[in-house]
Image (cartoon, rainbow, N blue to C red):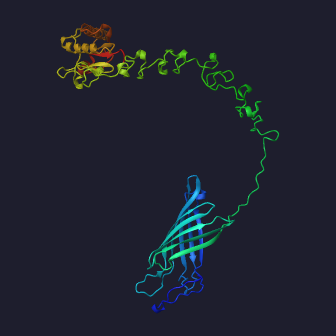
Amino acid sequence: MLWQAGDDLSAQGIARISSAVALGTPWLQVRGAPLQQSRGALLDLSVGLGLGLPLGSDVALTKDATVSVLPTVSAGRNFSLGDRPDFFRVGGSVSVLARGARTLSPSATVRDEVGSYFSAGLMISTLGTGLRGELSGRLDVPLTRSPVSGELLLGLRSPRVGPVEFYALGGPGLGNQPGAPLFRVLAGVALVTPLKKSEAPPPVVVDRCAVEPPAPECPRADGDGDGVPNATDTCPLVMGLASLSGCPDVDTDGDGVFASVDACPERVGPPARRGCPAPDGDGDGLDDDLDRCPATAGVVAFSGCPDSDGDGFEDAADACPTEAGVEASRGCPDRDEDGDGVVDRFDACRSVKGPATNQGCPATERQLVVITRERLVIRDKVYFASGKAVVLPRSAALLAQIARVLKEHPEIERVSVDGHTDDRGDRQMNQKLSEARAAAVRETLVTAGVAKERITSRGFGPDQPVQPNATPAGREANRRVEFVIVGAEH
């Protein structure tokens, strides 16, 4: 403290402040930086600890009552602006000054008790080698009976002259805490001496390609010993042929033709064509000699023939080649002619509305035929005279419905009428009986108007039971006629 002055308050019992030169509190401080932005951290972080020694002057009010302790945590980060790296820096710190409390005046209402306080500060400054500016602010929150105070400082730092730079700061104080200035001006000189690292002598570099013989990796050396220098050897680590730029004579495309004679080393082709594929006239990716439709672009799955609607059916086998359809309708889309919600291929009455529970037929007419993908399932059975191939009249309604369904569904190309018996009696007789009964049903359907080429008949005798023949009910179930769809898949 060089000089200070103040009002004479001896009448109030307050000793006059000494104006003589006095020593302030000496500080010993240590600080470490566990995080550094220059070493890849997100920011700079430092932790410090200071000790203030009570060696000042009591009469000059520069001496603390006890040893002071000052832990500090500081953080900062450099920021870029546009194409200017490290253009400015933002930092902050928090600290707590722990020291003994001391009251300056014997007032009844104490507002000047000096002691411990919490401090927080913020700073922003420009960076670089030229003139730099900085703005800082600090807020002190006393832990004693004293008001909050703060301070703002605006400063400049000169360009560095050798290891020396000059700085000056000034700004107002805020608040009435003892020690808070009305205005403060600071000036100083900083000595910056970077630590110099000892520089090791540069390593001796030996040009391995300038010596004899040159190293295997050098351009004029022959690393694989095939007589082709590395500079022109496409395969410098593998012995090869000069005609193949130093690469070995291998079958690169796996077509059985070695590279030395393969005119198309990256495309598969037969030896007769020197390893080149046959031409693809329609450009569908399939060679003409394998393309069943060489003049029309198609798909590989159909040997080069087209699938115009992309439904997975070759046009030649697609019943609707220009409309995407389903397999069950041979490439045609599902339709509902009568709009009753049952698609035509499962609708037993395609032109008359009816509920799905009655196979699309009117509810007033009980439908006995169910169309599935594999067969016509009947909800009744075909009755015959006992031991004979004579269809009884009570089956007329069922067979009439079957005939009508077949006539309304020409996409069902062919149906096999299959006859079955139980195992009672002579097996050979049962076989003949099943064949005769199936043929009798076929004739009935042909008579009802179904084209005879659409219906075949077969007899299986007792060979395909659906239930055990040990009971009357089982034998009754095994004596049956089935209608199996054996034409195009449905």
Q: Position of residue 159 (x, y in %)?
A: 64, 64
The N terminus lies in quadrant: bottom right
Q: Which quadrant of the view contains residue 28?
A: bottom right
From the viewer's side, name the closer residue of 182 and 219. Answer: 182
Q: Is residue 244 above or below residue 49?
A: above
Q: Residue at x 54, y 82 (%)?
A: 64
Residue 243 seen in this snapshot: yes
From the viewer's side, name the closer residue of 252 and 97. Answer: 97
Left/right placement of residue 22 relative to residue 139 reads right
Outermost bottom residue: 11
Q: Position of residue 301 (x, y in %)?
A: 47, 21
Residue 424 seen in this snapshot: no
Q: Is residue 3 above or below residue 157?
A: below
Q: Is residue 141 above or below residue 455?
A: below
Q: Residue at x 18, y 13 (%)?
A: 394
Outermost right residue: 212
Q: Position of residue 257 (x, y in %)?
A: 65, 21
Left/right placement of residue 161 relative to residue 311 reads right
From the viewer's side, name the closer residue of 126 and 372. Answer: 126
Q: Position of residue 31 (x, y in %)?
A: 59, 68
Q: Residue at x 56, y 52 (%)?
A: 82
